[in-house]
Image: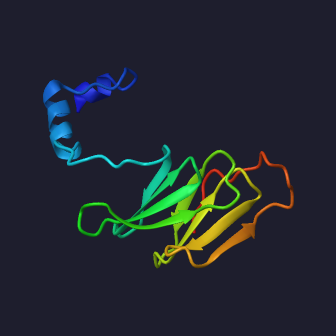
Amino acid sequence: LRRRQRRAGAAPFLSPSNVAGAMAAYVPGAVDGRMRLASRVFCGKFSQNGRVFVASETNGYMRIYDSSAGVLQPRNVIAAREVGWAIVDTAYSPDDQFLVYSSWTPHIHRVTLDGVTHEALEYSHHTDAWLCAFSGVF
């Protein structure tokens, strides 16, 4: 503790054994495979219970995965609306039935995870295309 207090203003320091311990505890040791996607993923988020993962691609698609078995299994693909460059953020509803997402637009969109219901929620009366909600919470 005293050593850390003396270094309070210095750059963070981890001993080699601390680094090895953190790597073993938090970094996967092997990768089973890689997903092949049509576009780059800009935003990804797990639901609160960890059973659903959404990956938002720069081409305007959101891929929904079932992650309840510990492996990402494709569940649905949703075409986002009014995407200006990329989907910036996503958020799940508390019951994990809906997803809201934002982009460079005066709307936040709400969609069911099956993609059946999709609606724009206006948060600004400005029609400026350079307007964006960078973060959202359901």
Q: In which quarter of the view is residue 67 placed?
A: bottom left
The colour scheme of the drawn protein is: rainbow
* Tally of numbered tags: 0
Q: Determine the residue positioned at 31% across, 28% down.
A: 5
Relative to 24, 47 lies left or right? right
Residue at image location 57% in from the left, 78% down from the top: 116
Image quarter of the C terminus: bottom right
Relative to 1, say whether 92 is above or below.
below
Q: Is residue 43 above or below residue 120?
A: above
Quadrant of residue 54 within the rendered picture: bottom left
* Figure check: 45 above or below 97: above
46 or 119: nearer the viewer: 119
Q: Quadrant of the N terminus?
A: top left
62 or 17: nearer the viewer:
62
Residue 12 image position (x, y, % from top left): 33, 26
Measuring from the top left, give residue 133's x and y in whole percent: 68, 54
In the rendered structure, the answer to whether residue 66 lies left or right of residue 87 reads left
Farthest-out residue, right: 126
Q: Position of residue 21 (x, y in %)?
A: 15, 38
Residue for point 50% across, 73% down: 113
- In this orientation, which residue lies closer to the viewer: 117 or 15? 117
Pinpoint residue 39: horizontal percent, then vertical percent.
50, 45
